[in-house]
Image (cartoon, rainbow, N blue to C red):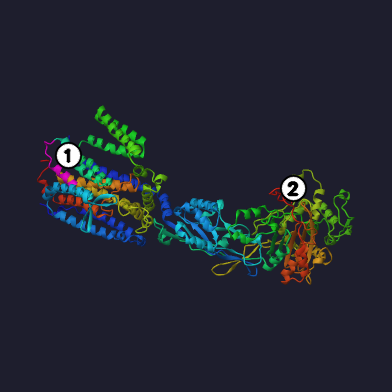
Amino acid sequence: MRRWYQTLDYVTILLWLTLVAFGLVAIYSTTHSPAAEFLPLSVRQNYYRQFMWVGISTFGILIALLLPVRFYQKTAYLAYAASILFLLAALVFGREINGAKSWITFGPMSLQVSELAKVGTILGVSQLVASRRGTQSDLRFAVTMIAMVMLPAMLVVLQNDAGTALVFVGLIPVLLFWSGVPYLVLLLLLAPAVAGYLSVVSVPWAIAFSIAFGLLIWWQTQDRKLGLIGVAVSGGTVAAVALALLKVLQPHQVARIMSFTDPSAQEYRYGVGFHLVQSLAAIGSGGLTGKGFMQGTQTQGRYVPEQSTDFVFSVIGEEFGFIGSALVLIVFAVLLTRLIRMGRQMKHPFGMMVAAGAAGVYLIHIVVNVGMATAVLPVIGIPLPFISYGGSALLAHTGILAVALALHMRRDDLSIYGFYT
Amino acid sequence: MIGDSGLDSQSDRARIFSIVIVVVLGLLMARLVQLQVINTSEYTGESRDNSMRELRVLPARGAVMDRNGIVLVDNQPAFSVRVTPRYFDPNSLPLLAELLEVNEEVLVERLRQASEFREYLPSILLNGVPFDRLSRMLERIDDLKGVDYEATQKRRYPSPVRASHALGYVREIGGDELTQRQSSGYRPGDLIGQRGIERIYEQDLRGRMGSDFRLVNVHGQDVSSFRKGVEDVDPVPGRDLILTLDADLQALAESLFVNKRGAAVAIDPSTGEILSLVSKPDFDLDQFTRQITSQQWAGLNASVSKPLFNRATQSVQMPGSTWKPLIAMIALQEGVITPEETVHCAGYHPMGRGKFFRCMHVHGDISVVRAIQESCNTFFFEMMRRLDVNAFARHARQLGFGQTTDTDITEQQAGLIPDSSYFNRTHGRWTVGYQMNIGVGQGELGVTPFQMARYVAAVATEGLVVTPHLIKASVDPETGALEAPDVPPPTPLDIRAEYVGLAKEAMRRVMVNGTGRGVQIPGIESGGKTGTAQNPRGRDDSVFIMFAPFENPQIAVAVMVENAGFGGSAAAPIASLMAEQYITGAISREWLVSRMLETRSDPLPEPKTSVEIRDATGD
């Protein structure tokens, strides 16, 4: 039997610390330079609050590492149920911050339950995968899994936080992929996402993609029907997106979605586009080496709105340049691939699912967040894991990681269950 | 479907998942390369425009003094109202126009220029705002977002000297000039020298604007220095200029030109320092320190008497008999006559059978000195008949005639010195008769008073050609050290000093018992020559050239009075009084001053059309 300190993945903890440190540095820069004297006191305290949350999260990791594997499996559904309950409670009693009614106050702390619900959902779905019996039909299993994800997603939508809800929806293909859905089905699930994105950027390309996708399916399967389904699914998305943009959505919603395609255009420049113009100016002007810690003119002049939360990447991009921002992406890439590796080492569906779920959640966050800050994706306000200011998100993201770490550390305990027994 | 996954399949999927992660993050990194490595300069500019404010530190424009240190131009405090277009609400324009008491259209235009220049930077909306209007505006400043003011300076003219054409004025920079000079630190609303000294020595007088670059936040609040001030530029104060002008002489000369049109140029014959440069009518420089209205401007431009026109350097006319000493010197140098040789004057030159080349008197046999002294036309017709016109032109050009001079007066006309190619060009077939008129300073010939002064100086110094100039020194703002201008040294004339001496002696005799004897300076020997130049537009122009004292001349003067008749009557007294003032520092002949105040140029006819077009070299 290996001892706990032989199996704990220190590298992951180091990577986590690196990212958290990046976040603290960026938040410090936005709140402690000479420019900060113009900030309200509550904002100036953000750094200390985040520091406190890092402390709480570290404590959370320690607790998580102490708990046995069995505990997680036994309480997985409970955690899921609790998440749903909290989401419902937030809808009824919750506090509204920035238009999203997803906050519950515990004494001095306000928690964004939609963030914490990610942990419960991943645990719940992982347990679903782990407890699956060979006799169960594939379809029924898949539908149950999707339903388990969509339930919190719907509640979050009701809380008026479409960005966070999108993370849940984005989790579905990841979980399905990991639990062994055929590639073809997965492609059919992902194609609409690509087609939808392309139809915002350029409708001709979206149509070309739909046709190419259908041909690819046809060529791969030698089945004309499946090819047509492929065209229909992606082409239908293109039509739906076009219809939504032209007829259904309000102009300000359209502007929000479209603005990233040309942020400095007159119709966006002083609206949503302002975020993007300023974020691009910040990141782009950072150049190769950046303007230096607390020397970013965009950051110090607070030109990028939400620069310590959703647009924190612009602070790093401006003050630490390409070297700094690329380093963040590399650390993320190492952390995520390491999580996948940890999943494989666990050789157990529950642990694998937790690790993959964590990697999936982070990946969606990173792509959406950095894609938004660099104006390749529409403005969707979700945090950059471990880096953005915000206690709930930090706690939730660290929580998933902590569970994965704990399961991985005690993977010898898991192995006795075998695989799909 | 879902159940077919074993361990192998799981590790395949793990590999695929890892690849997806690396590819997706790699794409984001490619985007970072695009933003931060390839296009970084574009975004750098954008972020600078956003967050950088330039606080300009305006150094005082240099003062201008006369040769004795009398201040001619300095500065007084003024206020400029500024606007930052990005924060300015155009709906408050009428209020602003009302408070500043200016036409709203003026502000609309200035606002448009400011917006084109830079949205986020304050630009000057109106210069020279009086304090009371500024206070009224400040009372309503809460309704005028994006408007502020800065304390600036405007020009002040504390001495009685006008010297409008020599000094020039400053105006707000605009249009193409602004576009060209933006890189040298000029901004909309900045003042720039437009004429005269103010224009030529713009760089010295202006100094260099200093810049403090400040970082402002998204709300426009000044946060800190920009990039720790590494780009800040220290201001360099403007240089004070000491001119060669003599304020007392200039003031006297200007007063003597009352009711007259014309010009006077006085120079130090051995150095070329311009002691006085008068062109009348002139204009009030002080009006340019206020917001000059378009009516005032149109009035200055359209006036028949052309006050903006610098007659001293731009008015081209025939020199009349003042030309004769020059022809005499050239004739002697070219050997077409000797000092003793005589020419017979029967009251006309025989060519043209006495119809065209007439003399005022019958001089009989006359030699060169007496011919100048008595201003015999026949003699000089004959000299010009004998001379090669190209030899004449070469000597005249060496004295600076027929061309502009490279000096600190930009507004100059070249005038006209004909040579054979000129005659070929203009007349095709021509005879010696065409050039004979030149002998008496008439015909196809054009000179400016500025050129004449230089010519007199050359006679006075017996053959030194100087470069007339206005600047004596500029003052280093830090050390106070005087820096002399880079003036070309005098060059010797291609005419033997002996011959120049003959012309000089002849001019002395003019003053003793010739046409200049009425304007002799009491107690000071001098040389002079009257001239009466035909003016196609009315009474003859009165011309006079003079130098004094005869030995070691200190001043050389050329005076021209338009439509005032005989040279001795109007131009000569002015020149004589100027020379006396400069040499003795006072005027002993008050009666002559009074007489001069009464002498006037014939009034100009009312213009038939609003704009009079004249051939620049033909009048």
Residue shown at 85%/58% (left/top)?
B376
Residue shown at 69%/68% (left/top)?
B248
Image: B235 above or below B111: below
- Dot 2 falls on a residue whose secondary structure is helix
What secondary structure prevails in the magenta region? helix
In the image, A127: left or right of B125? left
In the image, B390: left or right of B297? right
Quarter-wise, where is residue A210 in the image?
top left
Question: To which chain does the residue with label 2 belong?
Answer: B
Q: Are marks 2 and 1 in contact (CB under 8 Å)?
A: no
**Closer to the camera, B392 or A195?**
A195
Q: Position of residue B108 (x, y in %)?
A: 52, 51
Question: To which chain does the residue with label 1 belong?
Answer: A
Q: Is residue A124 magenta?
A: yes
Image: B418 above or below A48: above
Q: Is residue B38 magenta?
A: no
Q: Position of residue B412 (x, y in %)?
A: 67, 55
Q: Is disc 1 on the same chain as disc 2?
A: no
Q: How many marks?
A: 2
- Residue that mark 1 sits on: A144
Numbered label attached to residue B422: 2
**Closer to the camera, B330 or B594?**
B594
Quarter-wise, where is residue A19 in the image?
bottom left
User: Magenta region: which residues?
Assistant: A120-136
